[in-house]
């Protein structure tokens, strides 16, 4: 699997792109197989993440700090708690990012403190979501 080219609508800072690509190469085996990147919105910012993966894994694609963070990956620590909406269910739901698969069009509206910390640089560089 090769690193996908940058999308014209998704142009984070050059340093962040380099970090993401380096992390992509070293963490590639952590992802479930995927064919394409999907669009999700996190805290009002648009991100492109690999389909067919748990939300926490998807976020580690754009924020490599998540892969080495303090997450237990089995639902016990609750450091990955999120609130989200999907296109099919408009009501906000709470879940653990290590237990729910991200879907195209998903909107993550609330993040646990640890996740906000690990995503800070990525969200600062990401484009604002178009509604």
Image (cartoon, rainbow, N blue to C red):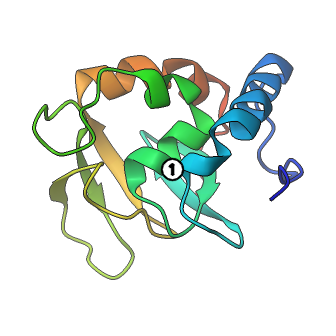
When the figure is inspected, residue 47 is found, relative to residue 78, above or below; the finding is below
In the shown orientation, is residue 76 left or right of residue 83? left
Residue 44 appears left or right of 33: left
> Dot 1, crowdedness within 10 Å: few (<14), some or many (≥20)?
many
Q: Percent from the top left, x then y, of residue 47?
A: 60, 47
Residue 45: image quadrant is top right
- Left of 108 or right of it: where is 122? right
Q: Nearer the viewer, residue 95 or 10?
A: 95
- Residue at 77%, 28% in the rendered image: 22
Res 78 quadrant in image: top left
Q: Who is closer to the viewer here, 110 or 76? A: 76
Please, what secondary structure does the residue beneath circle 1 have? helix
* Relative image position of residue 88 (x, y in whole percent): 34, 82
Q: Which residue is mark 1?
A: 58
Q: Is residue 96 above or below residue 54?
A: above
Q: Quadrant of residue 86?
A: bottom left
Q: Residue at x 45, y 29 (%)?
A: 66
Left or right position of 131 against 106: right
* Residue at the extreme front of the image, as rendered: 29
4 over 120 or under it: above or below? below
Q: Residue at the location (40% across, 53% down)? A: 55
Quadrant position of the C terminus in the picture: bottom right
In the image, residue 21 lies at what x, y percent?
79, 34
Quadrant (top left/top right/bottom left/bottom right) for the N terminus = bottom right
Q: Name the one closer to the observer, 84 or 16.
A: 16
Q: Nearer the viewer, residue 19 or 119?
A: 19
């Amino acid at each position: 699997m090769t690193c996908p080219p940058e999308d014209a609508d998704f142009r984070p800072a050059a340093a962040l792109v380099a970090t993401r690509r380096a992390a992509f190469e070293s963490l590639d085996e952590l992802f479930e197989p995927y064919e394409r990147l999907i669009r999700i919105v996190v805290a009002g910012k648009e991100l492109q993440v690999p389909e067919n993966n748990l939300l926490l894994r998807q976020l580690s694609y754009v924020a490599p700090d998540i892969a080495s963070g303090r997450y237990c990956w089995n639902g016990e620590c609750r450091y990955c708690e999120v609130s989200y909406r999907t296109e099919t269910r408009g009501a906000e739901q709470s879940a653990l990012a290590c237990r729910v698969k991200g879907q195209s069009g998903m909107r993550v509206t609330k993040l646990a403190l640890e996740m906000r910390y690990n995503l800070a640089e990525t969200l600062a560089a990401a484009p604002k979501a178009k509604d």
